[in-house]
Image (spheres, rainbow, N blue to C red):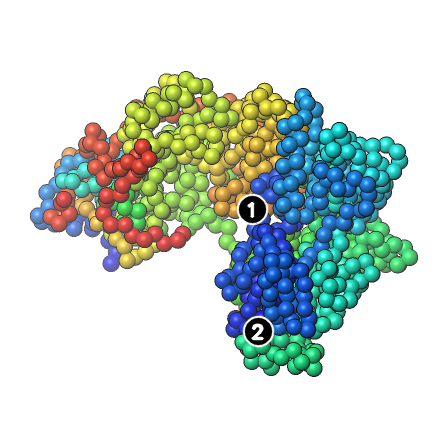
Amino acid sequence: MTLSPDATITRTPSAARWHDVCAYADLTPERGACAFVEGTQVALFRTHDGALHAVANLDPFSGAQVLSRGILGTRDGAPTVASPMYKQVFDLRTGVCLDDPRVALPTFPVRRGAGGDRVEVALAHEQRQ
Amino acid sequence: MRLVVIGHGPTGHRLVTALRDRDAAGAWRVTVVGEESRPAYDRVALTSHLTEGADLAYPAHGEEVDLVTGDPAVSVDRAARTVRTRSGREFGYDALVLATGSAPFVPPVEGRDLPGVFAYRTIDDLEAIRAHCADLTMSRREAEAIRGAVIGGGLLGLEAARALQGLGVAAHVVEVAPWLMPRQLDEGGGAMLRRHIEGLGLNVLAGTPMKALEAGEDGRVARVALADGTSLDAGVVVFSAGIRPRDELARGCGLPVGERGGIVVDGTCRTEDPAIYAVGECALVGGQVYGLVAPCFSMAEVVADRLLARASGGWASGTSAPAEDVDENADVDAGSGAVFAGADLSTKLKLMGVDVASFGDPFAGAGDGALDVTYTDPVAGIYKKLVVSDDARTLIGGVLVGDAAAYPTLRAYVGAELPGSPEQALFGGTEAAGGDLPGATVICSCNNVSADTIRCAIRDEGLTDLGEVKGCTRAGTTCGSCAPLVKKILDAELTAAGIEVSRALCEHFDHSRAELFDIVRVRGITTFTRLIEEHGRGRGCDICKPVVASILASLGHGHILEGEQAALQDTNDHFLANLQKNGTYSVVPRVPGGEITPERLIVIGEVAREFGLYTKVTGAQRIDLFGARVEQLPLIWKRLVDAGFESGHAYGKALRTVKSCVGSTWCRYGVQDSVAMAIRLELRYRGLRAPHKLKSAVSGCARECAEAQSKDFGVIATEKGWNLYVGGNGGMRPRHADLFATDLDDEALVRTIDRFLMFYIRTADRLQRTAGWLEGLDGGLEYLREVVVDDRLGICAELDAAMERHVAAYSDEWRDTLDDPGKLARFVSFVNAPGTPDPSIAFEPERDQIKPVLIAGSRLEVAAR
């Protein structure tokens, strides 16, 4: 299954509640930031083309909350983040680890708010802590 | 079947290892009886044990080998087939191998038993010399130098002299022959070596026999009396005047020995008694005793082969053959064709930083139908001689002093026709070889590996890198001198097989790091976006982005967190701190040269206490503070910067530290102010971004307390200035630095390092330390010297200017960050809750400090990467 960045956004669960987390301009292009949403750490990324992605901040390989500090890039065209700890690369759209496809990060719906200058994240019910 | 090996030196160890490796069925039960109190160690590297504290121990044998140490064998009963040790233990054998080695020859001169007179063979000898010199140091008056003498100017004698020098002894080398290393070198080579050795502060007396050793008032040795009536002061005397085979056990049981010693064996290393073999320095094979490690190892391999043939030669394994059966069956090991066919006595070594090599027969003369082709450069200290057949085509032998880069190739051509003229061969014209070497040519003489063996291994096993070839064939694993040649054979094989070794950095760039560096430099590119749009594809990754960030930083394009550059940085550079396993960071302020005032030490202590950080002193003479959360970093650095500290760049692929010893200011032995030089160098190169981290050290004398020879660039003080070493490394793949330039004054030293660093930064691969870069550099150290000293490429002015730009543009990264709200914005825990600390970070106490607790979700096993 291949998803475009837009498709990720449309996967919004109906039960989700959107959280305003920061201004779009707060996000450095091609860098991440971490948001604390209902007890969950969400890694937010703004890629080169301006698209937004949100995955769990927890690096499953090291157990540390660090993925928002990884380097962004592409692999075969897919937008990626590399864990700053042991450098595994994850597909930002699906959360799948491209170095070990048995592992996937939880992904979160993310969008620009009504005015376009804010960033909003939603958690599925089971993702709330 | 029972095998007893007497002697656990390098040869005995090699025999047992070779046998165990190949005796899969376990046909032989092996007992080794050793005289020394410790298991086998690398005797060849004895001096480095003293000067570098190298661990010389060989790998231990498995449990199936019984090793007896410190209990020498005293007799062999050939009829009963037993060996008795000094403590009275008795071991029965079906086969016995004598690997008893040799004893240093001490000529029968008066005074040879005085306290302070030593041999140079074992670790115990070395310890005794060290203790004696320490005692002399303690009891001497004033700061007078301790003097010593080494009797014998051969290979081992020069090693011993280096060891004495390492102990702070001013040493004389007394050689009876008219030149140094008379067994390996001709007169011209010996004379050139002498110039080098004397340049290092040793006094050489050649052609001067000694007469007697004389005692001082305290009854210890004090003088060496020479045959010409003069004498030398020497509070310590070391004999290295040759070896005598240890053949007393063989004599005791009636085995024939040579007139001048040595257990007589045939080409299979077997004695007159078919159950007994002798290998190594105790064996007399073909009328000769071999004192070099390579032929001794060959003998060990031959006997291992013969023993395996015995085991499969008709006896049921595990049962003892009755003695009479064996006597009837004297060729029990004939199932093996292995013979010791004489040895290649070629040698290459580095004596006190001087390359010396001798190969083939360097002494063949006109009478043997041979011609000499010699080259002497007294300024560079280079002497080269090739001995060729009278038609100047076939290589017979040669000597190289001062530059032995051509050794592996030349040695491989001994006995074969040279591909070009002797002149071309002398000046490295055959260097490109590898593909065209004759198949039977022995490439690795230490392990007797031929070119064909290497080629077959590459083809059959599908090997693609040097490490694999070494592991598979053992070529290049002992002295390492043939490794460049092995690499060339590998490259030639891969090319022939159509395998192209890709130099592409990653999927986004087809270029190597060095190529990208040139593109960025020449085209004046200042952003990653332009570089990847014009020369790459995609949007980069965690491999190419930090490389480009480093290139831009090396070329001086501003603060590493400025604009688009910020997005390229690895997390360490992005937060100007070192990420630790629980997501916190560590902080290392710069402490130039390791010199620090009490006031600053107190500031570090106060900051650590206030922020609850774990504190540890690093190996590079500074202090690391662990456990800082991202949002704490600016607060911590505000305190440090206010107290005058700067970033230590512990997080960057950049200069880390320049370590130092206290030098001539405080130390009784220091000859230069090493602290001042270390601070000068550290302040000059701080902030310099490179393909990998850079480490340095400055030692104030030859005792080398700052460990400069394990650094990327290391400086050691001499009476006349500074010696510069380059390409050293600690860590996973330790490498001793190479002596690059000697007796430089301050300015010449700095200029040479400037160029060395800039050339490295321009041309090295991603994450390649100077050690690997230097090893891979075509033309090696000599080429590097041509580039940075002789300016062969005409780029020195450019390299100098680049370094001047770096020095002028330096600014403390942390101070600049604190002054810039835009850069500070990143130091928050959560973008929507900047005041909330990350709740997943927790600590627990350990030894009165903190340690991290991982409380976040499950952890996956990290595959080895």
Alpha-carbon span between mark 2 and mark 1 = 34 Å
> Same subunit under labels 2 and 1?
yes
Residue type, mark 1 in image: Asp
Q: Is residue B590 above or below residue B214?
A: above
The residue that mark 2 highlights is: B1
Most distant residue in the front direction: B88
User: Residue A37 at x, y = what percent?
Assistant: 16, 39
Q: Nearer the viewer, residue B560 or B70?
A: B70
Q: SS of the residue at dot 2?
A: loop
The residue that disc 1 covers is: B55
Q: In the picture shown, does residue A95 fall above or below B288?
A: above
Q: Residue at x 69, y 71 (%)?
A: B78
Does residue B301 appear in the picture of this structure? Answer: no
Element class at badge 1: loop
Image quarter for residue B841?
Answer: top left
In the rendered view, does B498 fall on the left or right side of B306?
Answer: left
Q: Nearer the viewer, residue B179 or B436?
A: B179
Q: Residue at x 63, y 33 (%)?
A: B134
Q: Position of residue B717 (x, y in %)?
A: 63, 28
Q: Is residue B862 visible?
A: yes
Find residue B57 and report its horizontal and vertical position in percent.
56, 51
Q: Does residue B732 lie above or below B850 as drawn? A: below
Which residue is drawn at the image coordinates 34% and 32% (left, top)? B614
Letter of the chain that mark 1 sits on in the rendering: B
Query: Is disc 1 surrounded by few (<14), some (14 to 19) or many (20+) residues within 10 Å?
Result: few
> Is the residue B626 above or below the residue B482 in the image?
above
Tag 2: residue type? Met
